[in-house]
Amino acid sequence: MATAIIERDGAFHFHVKGEMTFATAKQLLKQSEDFFFQSQDIEIDLSQVTGADSAGLALLLEWKARATQQGVQVVINEIPEGMMSIAHLCQIEPLLQDLTSKN
């Protein structure tokens, strides 16, 4: 069974451990619901993600949308290569570039 968890590294810094896949995306979305209701920018580290698919990529885009709705910026560090490959195939790499750099 695939597992994933989001852990807090600091006030507005988080990291994901485990898989970001169809099996875990809903669970991760639920865990992240409160992140975007704070008035601070947040940073999420994906260096401990062990597997990812298109559902994980969709979750990143959902996080971006929620942050935009709340007027905060989300920065994603260490996006897995598999997600970047899917983004390249779908021609949405610019959306991920917006997530990986602070403006």
Image: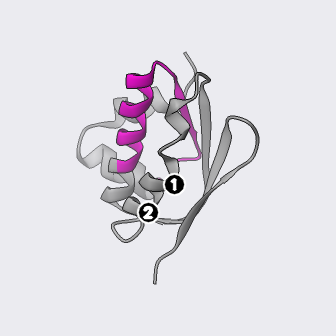
Query: Amino acid type of disc 2?
Result: Gln
Give me the disc on residue 31. Answer: 1
Read off the residue under disc 2.
27
Residue at the location (58% across, 22% down)?
Answer: 39
Name the quadrant of the C terminus.
top right
Q: Secondary structure at mark 1?
A: helix
Kindly give the residue lying farthest to the right in the view shown: 10
Question: Residue 34, percent across and down?
Answer: 52, 41
User: From what the image shows, is residue 81 above or below residue 64?
Assistant: below
> Which image quadrant is residue 25 in?
bottom left
Region of the chain picked out in magenta, as a range: 59-81
Query: Is residue 2 shown to the viewer in this render?
Result: yes
- The alpha-carbon separation of the residues under discs 1 and 2 comes to 6 Å
Q: Report if residue 60 lies within the magenta region.
A: yes
Up-down: is 72 above or below 35? above
Instruction: Give the colour scheme shown.
Output: one colour
Q: Residue at x 51, y 74 (%)?
A: 3
Task: Return the x and y of residue 38 as percentages of the image width and height.
Answer: 58, 28
The residue that appears at 37% across and 24% down in the rendered structure is 69
